[in-house]
Image (cartoon, helix red, strand yellow):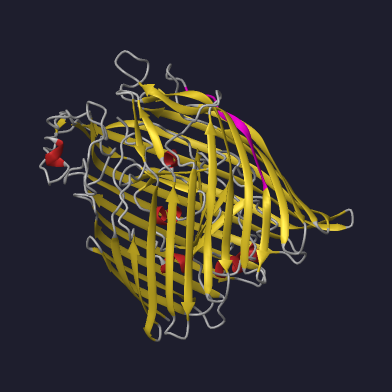
């Protein structure tokens, strides 16, 4: 069986749109939608144009560096969990899915350039030390990505070198022997400040609330910025993350016994063994040239190379244990090696144009990318026998490591994607603006995966139209529309690839700014429909046309609609707030509830209060709640349910002496017990209450 169960969803190998070089400095030092600061800075992620929040006809949220530090959000999973409208599906310890507005998130970027998450999955914990902020543009985004679900696009904004010398060093110590150090130094390399650099490092070593689980992670970053002339700038960088995990979950806990009743597990229950591991190394190197012309136009070209290597020895548990004896869980082991290489190129230009006596903004670009991926497999020669649930779920258990077959190449696939895109910010009237654009793409996949030919060749043009009307100096109304073209890797019961899902996405709402534009509030309605969207329909068995154990799918017409309310910014100079509410409805073509493992309502709130006079004392809290979820186990004909739950996090920080900050974070204060996801029908429990203390020195 494949390391990903071969439930493969193509992540687009390239997407583009980033701020023009003229705005790059602004975005390097300010937040686009600041959770704890101003909310009026320009943002280029949604359209490729530098627009304010009110000028952008889509919903956008950003978690900035200040909030990352305040709440010790050291990995992307914890960070995205706190984002309005984003769900994090922790299906395993080292494999995570994300969704928004009822659909999987498949588009990820770094500095506006596509990030290759194979199958839309994050392998291992992605550290946040390299990023200044993390953006989420919710809904379909034809200009920015061209392909994918009408869910969201996540953009990780890297830290940039600074003209002034600055440095920080921090040490953290927390529950489950969590030990972490961070170092970040940036500044000029010459007297004029035209050449600057930034060096970043983080090391984390921790156990887990889950039995056997341990993570050792190192992160490195080096970025160089050179202002060759006032008009020409070059930059280059290299980052690497090594995430070594032991005692990992592949799959999770079987939740039902042979009577269809829920099995009672402690927080720490795990089907793993001490000989399992999942080591992932991600490297990225890039170079960029940017030029600002004298007429307001600017251009930028960037090349990026990404390499990932993954090695794992995994154990998957399955079965329905006997209700009386607890015996009946069996394990299947496998070893996997999965290297991949990606090459990305992007050219972008933007500037003003004059039409009909008014000045407008135009942006266009061309992108191309290629991803080469391979997977090598070694299957376990014997099944792994588990003792009774009462033994392995509550105590350390010795599970016999099986022998393995010889390594064989089971997957070798190449994805190629070329995109041409353009957008016009049309100044129709003093109070009426339009964003009109389109993205054309050409996609080709070649190769084979576990005996199945992966060939496909698709092309399409996705238009985008948005309107923004300024009703008053503080309030704007907006609406946007885009087509959906979503190529799929899923196969049907005949083991043939499903046709692309097609549809449309619409969004409209109101945006407003208050307290001298320090506080931003919005409310939106959205509706997205996809025809022929892949939904799991069964598993191939002996004699079927597909690989035994592989999942096959059926195309389902799916409609998602709902609303979001969001508030972010500062109420006063010392009081920051952020949060929002999402209401969602998902139906299939017959009007029945679909994707019931996704919450229909969620509420996320965060706030901090700063008292500078009391040694910079800061107090804060994060709160999130979601409604109940469920999934049907068709084998025993029972629904598996997770009731609604709430999680509260608290933080406090103070400066005992100048430049030194001491802080404490308490996660899950009320010790809520809940499952991390029901997406796969198996699950494990999220972490109980934990504490983290931090000392940080800033220069």
Instruction: Pinpoint residue 338: horizontal percent, then vertical percent.
Output: 33, 40
Instruction: Pinpoint residue 674: horizontal percent, then vertical percent.
Output: 33, 47
Q: Is residue 21 magenta?
A: no
Q: Residue furthest right?
A: 357
326 relative to 166, above or below: above
Magenta span: predominant SS is strand
> Looking at the image, can residue 31 be seen?
no
Point out the stretch of residues depicted in magenta.
497-508
558 relative to 59, above or below: above
User: Quadrant where the C terminus lies?
Assistant: bottom left
Q: How many marks?
A: 0
Image quadrant in which you'd find residue 662: bottom left
> Looking at the image, can residue 579 be seen?
yes
Q: Nearer the viewer, residue 455 or 3?
A: 3
Q: Residue at x 28, y 61 (%)?
A: 690
246 relative to 584, above or below: below
Instruction: Pinpoint residue 318: horizontal percent, then vertical percent.
Output: 24, 31
């Amino acid at each position: 069986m494949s390391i990903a169960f071969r439930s493969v969803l193509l992540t687009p190998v390239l997407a583009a749109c980033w701020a023009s070089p003229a705005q790059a400095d602004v975005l390097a030092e300010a937040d686009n939608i600041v959770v704890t600061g101003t909310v009026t800075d320009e943002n280029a992620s949604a359209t490729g144009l530098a627009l304010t929040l009110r000028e952008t006809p889509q919903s956008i949220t950003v978690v900035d560096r200040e909030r990352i530090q305040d709440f010790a959000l050291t990995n992307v999973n914890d960070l995205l969990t706190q984002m309005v409208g984003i769900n994090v599906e922790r299906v395993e310890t080292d494999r995570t899915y994300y969704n928004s507005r009822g659909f999987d998130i498949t588009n990820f970027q770094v500095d506006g350039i596509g990030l290759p998450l194979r199958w839309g999955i994050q392998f291992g914990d992605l550290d946040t030390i390299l990023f200044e902020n993390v953006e989420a543009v919710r809904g379909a985004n034809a200009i920015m990505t061209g392909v994918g679900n009408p869910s969201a696009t996540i953009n990780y904004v890297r830290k940039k070198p600074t003209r002034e010398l600055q440095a920080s060093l921090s040490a953290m110590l927390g529950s489950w022997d969590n030990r972490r150090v961070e170092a970040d130094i940036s500044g000029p390399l010459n007297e004029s400040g035209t050449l600057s650099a930034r060096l970043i490092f983080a090391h984390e070593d921790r156990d887990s609330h889950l039995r056997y689980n341990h993570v050792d992670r190192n992160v490195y970053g080096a970025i160089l910025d050179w202002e060759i002339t006032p008009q020409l700038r070059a930059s280059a960088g290299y980052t690497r993350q090594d995430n070594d995990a032991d005692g990992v979950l592949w799959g999770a806990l079987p939740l039902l016994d042979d009577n269809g009743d829920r099995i009672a597990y402690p927080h720490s229950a795990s089907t793993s063994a001490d000989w399992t591991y999942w080591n992932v190394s991600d490297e990225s190197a890039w170079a960029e040239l940017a030029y600002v012309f004298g007429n307001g136009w600017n251009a930028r070209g960037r090349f990026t190379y990404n390499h990932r290597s993954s090695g794992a020895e995994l154990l998957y548990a399955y079965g329905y244990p006997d209700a009386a004896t607890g015996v009946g869980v069996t394990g299947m082991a496998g070893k996997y090696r999965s290297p991949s290489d990606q090459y990305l190129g992007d050219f972008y230009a933007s500037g003003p144009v004059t039409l009909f006596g008014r000045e407008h903004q135009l942006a266009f670009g061309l992108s191309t990318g290629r991803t080469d991926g391979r997977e090598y497999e070694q299957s376990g020669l014997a099944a792994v026998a588990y003792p009774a649930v009462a033994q392995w779920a509550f105590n350390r258990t010795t599970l016999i490591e099986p022998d393995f077959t010889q390594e064989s190449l089971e997957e070798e696939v190449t994805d190629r994607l070329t995109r041409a895109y353009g957008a016009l910010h049309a100044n129709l009237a003093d109070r009426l603006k339009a964003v009109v654009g389109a993205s054309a793409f050409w996609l080709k996949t070649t190769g084979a995966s576990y005996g199945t030919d992966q060939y496909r060749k698709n092309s399409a043009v996705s238009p985008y139209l948005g309107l923004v009307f300024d009703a008053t100096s503080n309030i704007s109304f907006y609406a946007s529309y885009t087509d959906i073209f979503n190529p799929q890797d899923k196969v049907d019961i005949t083991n043939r690839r499903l046709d692309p899902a097609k549809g449309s996405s619409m969004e409209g709402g109101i945006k407003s700014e208050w307290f001298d534009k320090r506080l931003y509030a919005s409310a939106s309605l959205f509706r997205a429909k996809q025809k022929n969207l892949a939904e799991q329909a069964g598993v191939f068995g002996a004699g079927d046309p597909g690989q035994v154990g592989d999942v096959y799918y059926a195309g389902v017409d799916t409609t998602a609609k709902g609303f979001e309310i969001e508030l972010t910014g500062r109420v006063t100079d010392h009081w920051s707030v952020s949060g929002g509410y999402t209401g969602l409805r998902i139906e299939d073509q017959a009007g029945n509830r679909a994707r019931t493992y996704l919450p229909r309502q969620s509420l996320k709130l965060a706030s901090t209060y700063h008292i500078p006079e009391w040694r910079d004392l800061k107090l804060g809290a994060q709160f999130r709640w979601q409604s109940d979820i469920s999934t049907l186990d068709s084998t025993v004909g029972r629904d598996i349910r997770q009731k609604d739950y709430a999680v509260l996090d608290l933080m406090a920080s103070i400066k005992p002496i100048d430049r030194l900050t001491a802080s404490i974070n308490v996660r899950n204060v009320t010790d809520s017990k809940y499952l991390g996801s029901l997406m796969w029908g198996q699950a494990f429990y999220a972490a109980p209450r934990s504490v983290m203390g931090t000392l940080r020195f800033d220069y």
